[in-house]
Amino acid sequence: HVRHSTCMHMDIHLTHTDGAFPDAIPFLKWCNRRGIATGVISNADERYGDSILPMLGLGDDMRFLTFSKNVGYEKPAKEIFRAAMKQAEPWLCLVKCKNANDDNDTASDGSSFPLLRPEEVLHIGNDFKKDYLGAKDAGFHAVLLDRYDEKELASSWREMGAPVFKDLIDVVEYLGREQYELGPPR
């Protein structure tokens, strides 16, 4: 069963106290080469997107930044996830609109942007309730990262049904094993 993902949302797990995790930039570049829109959904202050991400070299590869203060909802509310999905649609149009020939591939408001469906989105997070349950409630696929080797916490997440990985390389391998088709539809 092939699942398709054209958009990936990520939480603040791209960074740690010493800078970006070593897999963050290669992962973002890998996604961009495949036409996958990547961005951030965060309950943090929008200054994270204005200064911290660019300072770490992550700003150029993010196609959208969705901050709770700007949309009026915090994770795990599905509204913040849906707002991020809408922010990704214009970028996806650069890739996907060239192939869109039917009316079902445009946004419901009549704009020329392709309608991104929740089942085409993978959210990668680091909090079971805010990220995993929030994304699933919005209709997205979701996985969690255990960046700090918190074995008991990661085990409890797995027991509750969440796929949990050490890093973004593990996520890529998982997507391959699960037969995800990444990138815009052909």
Image: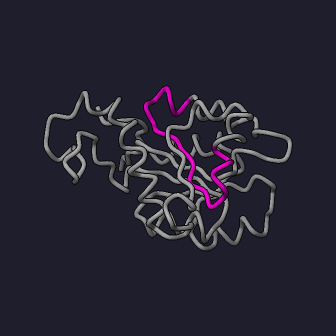
Query: Can you say whether 113 is above or below 123 in the image?
Result: above
Number of numbered discs overlaid on the protein picture = 0
Query: Can you say whether 37 is above or below 119 in the image?
Result: above
Q: Is residue 65 left or right of residue 93?
A: right
Residue most toward the left? 102
**Is 74 contained in the magenta span?**
no
**Is 41 contained in the magenta span?**
yes
Q: Is residue 63 left or right of residue 102?
A: right
Which of the image's four quarters has the C terminus?
top left
Which residue is nearer to you in this view: 171 or 90?
90
Give x and y (percent) for residue 62.
Answer: 55, 37
Query: Can you say whether 99 is above or below 126 in the image?
Result: above
Residue lying at 46% horizontally and 57% vertically, measured from the top left: 141
Its colouring scheme is one colour
Give x and y (percent) for residue 152.
Answer: 78, 69
Q: Which region is colored magenta? A: 30-49
Which residue is nearer to you in this view: 11 or 79?
79
Give x and y (percent) for residue 185.
Answer: 31, 36
Give x and y (percent) for residue 38.
Answer: 52, 41
Which residue is nearer to you in this view: 1 or 26?
26
> Image quadrant of residue 140?
bottom left
Residue lying at 36% horizontally and 46% vertically, measured from the top left: 2
Residue lying at 47% horizontally and 66% vertically, measured from the top left: 136
Query: Can you say whether 38 is above or below 33 in the image?
Result: below
Q: Is residue 153 left or right of residue 69?
A: right
